[in-house]
Image (cartoon, rainbow, N blue to C red):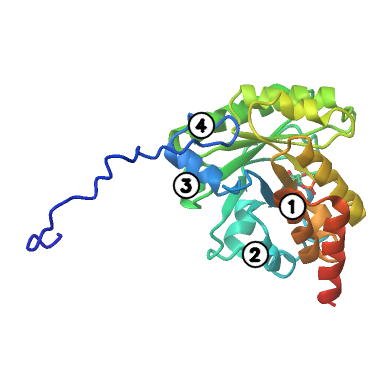
Amino acid sequence: MADQDGIQDTQKYFVDIPMASEPFTLRGSNSRDWGFKNRLSNIFHHETGKTVMLAIDHGYFLGPTAGLERVDLSIVPLLPYADTLMCTRGILRSTIPPTFTKGIVLRSSGGPSILKELSNEEIAVDIEDAVRLNVAAMAVQVFIGGEHETKSVHNMTRLVDIGNRYGIPVMGVTAVGKDMVRDAKYMRLAARICAELGAAYVKTYYVAEGFDTVTASCPVPIVIAGGKKLPEQDALKMAYRAVQQGAAGVDMGRNIFQSEAPAAMIQAVGKVVHENRNPEEAYDVYRTLKSETK
Ligand code: R5P
């Protein structure tokens, strides 16, 4: 207990200064509780409102994906450059140092491997474990138009309900089936359904035509997946266009960890996302950093 001797008179009331009440500017989240906002702030940078989320959860249905064979060697060195890491609890517990204090977005759905129907997922983590792991958000795949559409949407809404109880946001991950058209119409539909049903933010793919309508019609932040590996300059162009058209950053995996110089690439992506640097400038950063690491 505080020492009761020598208690000083209180006088610093600053009666002329209105009490600060900072708005929480991340799209769609202002009415959330403190813990929820605090977790989102561990994903989206408080100054830029954006994130470079490094996605390494591919093994949950693909097994040891190229670039992720040894997460300890390929990914751990990249952690200082990521705002957030998206991974499974298996990799988190086994390989990610607990000294990593930025946000963890936990892959929280799963079930089928690449050998089966991918939309047939279940919730794959208990909320108690998500709390125990101190995660910033839970990620769940939503297969709009897929064979198990309703089940995957229900996975998300159940996680939203459970997450809300504990102040843990849910990221809806729109999964585009092989037979579906990746266009703005589909992305608008999928992203909006995720947001309407409670996702705190949504991951979609970038589409060349009309991506601004996808972000405009989604009341929560959108981050883009990187998708298959592209030449570095093209991946930077895609990230730039997405951010300029309203994306709140990237959830990028293969275009970083399959790059010839992953550390250089993630830093170049950071320039595009947080500093609005154009793709040419960011590519210069990539090349310079790459040459320095040789
Ligand atoms: C799918 O395996 C995961 O949700 C990935 O996190 C997502 O596709 C982002 O990774 P990439 O940039 O490699 O597409």
Front tag of 3 and 4: 4
Looking at mark 2, is its residue's CB closer than 8 Å to ligand 1? no
Label 2, residues with CA under 10 Å away: few <14, some 14-19, many ≥20: few
Q: Earlier in the sequence, mark 2 or mark 1?
A: 1
Q: How many marks?
A: 4
Residue type, label 1: Gly
- Circle 3 is placed at which residue position? 131
| Mark 4 secondary-structure assignment | loop
| Mark 2 secondary-structure assignment | helix
Q: From the viewer's side, name the closer residue of 246 and 202.
A: 246
In the image, what residue occupies the spot 76% across and 59% down? 266
From what the image shows, is residue 74 above or below residue 148?
below
Residue type, label 3: Val
Q: Earlier in the sequence, mark 1 or mark 3?
A: 1
On screen, residue 247 versus residue 294, left or right, reads left
- Circle 4 is placed at which residue position? 30
Q: Earlier in the sequence, mark 2 or mark 3?
A: 2
Q: Earlier in the sequence, mark 3 or mark 4?
A: 4
Mark 2 and mark 3: Cα distance apart in space:
23 Å
User: Which numbered disc covers residue 59?
Assistant: 1
Residue type, label 4: Asn
Mark 3 near mark 4, Cβ–Cβ under 8 Å? no
Mark 1 and mark 3: Cα distance apart in space:
22 Å
Mark 1 near mark 3, Cβ–Cβ under 8 Å? no
